[in-house]
Amino acid sequence: MPNFNKTKMITDVTMHYCPGCTHGIIHRLVAEVLEELNINDNAILVAPVGCSVIAYNYFKCDGIEAAHGRAPAVATGVKRVHPNKVVFTYQGDGDLASIGMAETVHVASRNENVTTIFVNNAIYGMTGGQMAPTTLVGQVTTTSPYGRASKNESGPIHIAEMISTIQGPAYVARVSVHDVPNIKKAKEAIKKAFQYQLDGKGYSLVEVLSTCPTNWGMSPVDALKWVKDNMLNVFPLGVYKEEK
Amino acid sequence: METKMIFAGFGGQGVLLAGQLIAEAGMQKGKNVSWMPSYGPEMRGGTANCSVVISDDIIGTPIILDPQILVAMNKPSLESMQNMVVENGTIIYNSSLIKKDEINKINGINYIGLPCSEIALELGNPKVQNMPIIGAVMEVTKSFNEDDIKKAMLSKFGETKAKMIDLNMEAVAKGKETVIKGVN
Amino acid sequence: MEKKLMKGNVAIAEAAIHAGCKCFFGYPITPQNELIEHMSKRLLKLEDGVFVQSESEVAAINMVFGAAGAGARVMTSSSGPGLSLKQEGISFLAGAELPAVIVNVMRGGPGLGGIQPAQSDYFQATRGGGHGDYYTMVYAPANVQEAVDLVQKAFDKADEYRNPVIILADGVIGQMMEPAEIKDNDNSANYKKDWAVTGKEGSHNILRSLYLDPHELNIHNKNLTKKYEKIEANEIMFETAFIDDADIMIVAYGTTSRIARSAIREAREKGIKVGLFRPITLWPFPLKELKEAAKNTKNVVVAEMSSGQMIYDVKLALEGSKPVSFVGEAGGIIPTTKQILEAIELASKEE
């Protein structure tokens, strides 16, 4: 029987995430990967603005807090000064796909040798459930109270697809954590992303479909089912770009 | 005449709504009122509180640190806030969650136990557990009456939920009754 | 509309709509979210309503620039970090002389800071905020009804002077509920915007802030200065209370002025004669009026929800004529009635 051990890369600080939120799973996957790749003592985290703003309290490595959306620019600065360290951003949909879109596009375009973990739950969590750039058509949020309408807001942005069209990036994938087989696949993708950085091949981005039981107004179990039933067909999983 | 109050409890116990209805009832009475909530990141499982002022004069600070009335719906709120209550003030505590003999009482404060969950269960709807608070505050402060609170509910709930008002008013009456009976 | 118990954020949004503002662009940030949420709820249902949740505050203010240039009554709202991003657009609005109303529901800074109430953006709001020689009118409401009235007035003044107006509120004003009455107060018909870009046949209106010829830019700046002088001469608003027999004068604005009012009541019960001076316009600041009000007092206490920013304007107004002391808290901690009372008692003991 294998032992289920505590991940060394995660601190003992009690997480502030709501019950049933999948940030905890994704944090653990990233931490396990960092440990397995032996990069636990030379990693630098760039945290976003959003629910994971204080992710630096949970990862046992150096952390730097970026202004809203600017994590890729901050990561660029850090990486250029410390090219031999492993630098990664951990960003939500508002941070990465809305206010930070310019930085998101250009970190990929420069093929900056950093890794981005992009957590997409189709809503703004921290500020109370406003529409995100990845909100589905028809989805009700506090700023699309009648459902996201094609007329006023069109449809969601597809980050993995979009970033994969740029010449620069080495690895782009979309995964989900709504069930155990997918959690395993997500970990593989995250590991691959960091491996690309270790090999000096350039920018890697893993988009992770996630939940927000609180602002979706669902139980955690229903929220996982909602990912499967509603998000997977809008955001197809898979590897979108992979430099050989 | 100025009545300063704090309502505190777990998120979901309805303390913010109870405070709002009381402020609105004060407004219906023609008084100056303010309602100020604690606010934070949108997360589940936190605590909530609000300050309410009902006054004949222009209201100064809406943030209350020296209430005449504290409504504590859970033990952490009671323990962290009972020291703020002014001398001769009143603490209305949720006796469904806080046992009388567990309270470290402060001299010069009037303690009133209100079995909020039992009242709500008796009326067949756990959602009205915050309504007895209103009845108790009404009886203690006399700052507003049943008519004012009814008008406040009508304005707050809107036409669609207006049918809930009778049940809510029953719960309000039970809260008032508890204070009159002096059951602690 | 009858008097209703309303959250400050919601009341500000509703007041704007009743002042003819059917155009809103914004981005979520605490503690102003109810404002943008209410705008989406209302404007998306109006035939002529425009609501866009922009991708960033930079985009929001530039959407405001476009809509203002197109002749609409337009508003955006945010809090500290968002206001910093908006500074580019606010400078451009001032440069191109376009009317807009910008709401800042202040929270603690600097940087990401926190989300609890503060008054730490006073410098930014009252000194232009962005690059270049310019000012925006700054209104500081102290209660929900006043927020309603000032927002409606802001649209008229923005149109009258072709200048941005900032509503400088704070987390308390935004989150608090108080009774407010919102009247229909749409005076947009009084302001002819023949400078707007409307695509009318034969029109060649240009809205710009670029003047490559420094002489031309100098003249533009001199014209702006003349406008600002006119605003300073005509648009100052302030309030005093208990000032006639006061030995000590407290200067405070917004939420802090209410805490000061509570402290003044307690001080007067103790026999200390203390009064309140409350600027309502922070720019233009009531310099002469403050000095005049302080004439018969011994000293002045400034109370702020910051480390001390307005105090520089108070000192400027008093020109060294009175001793000035400060009481305040920053970072989202709200100064208490007791703290201000202690500052009053300390000042009363000074000779």
Image (cartoon, coloured by chain):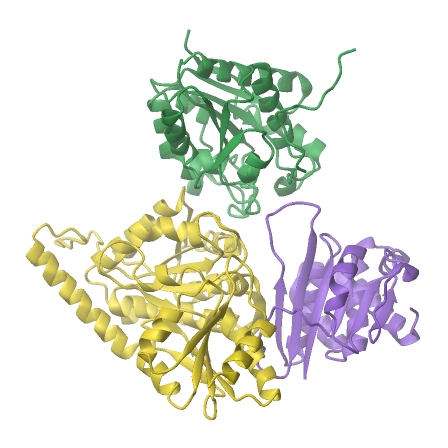
Front one among A167 and A135: A167
In this view, the residue farthest toward the bottom is C245
Q: Position of residue C242 (x, y in %)?
A: 50, 88
Q: Is residue A66 visible?
A: yes
Q: Position of residue C322 (x, y in %)?
A: 38, 82
The colour of chain B is purple
- Which corner quadrant of the image does residue C264 belong to? bottom right
- Which corner quadrant of the image does residue A24 belong to? top right
Residue that appears at 46% across and 14% down: A198
In this view, the residue farthest toward the top is A244
Q: Position of residue C262 (x, y in %)?
A: 58, 78
Q: Is residue A49 above or below residue B4?
A: above
Residue B91 placement, left or right of C312: right
Q: Is residue B162 visible?
A: no
Q: Is residue B5 above or below residue A89?
A: below
The colour of chain C is yellow
Chain that the image shows in green:
A
Front one among C203 and B38: B38
Q: Position of residue A102 (x, y in %)?
A: 35, 34
Q: Count every numbered label the image shows and give the total.
A: 0
Residue C313 placement, left or right of B105: left
Residue B108 placement, left or right of C337: right
Q: Is residue C78 above or below residue B113?
A: above
Q: Is residue C266 above or below residue C41?
A: below
Front one among C265 and A43: A43
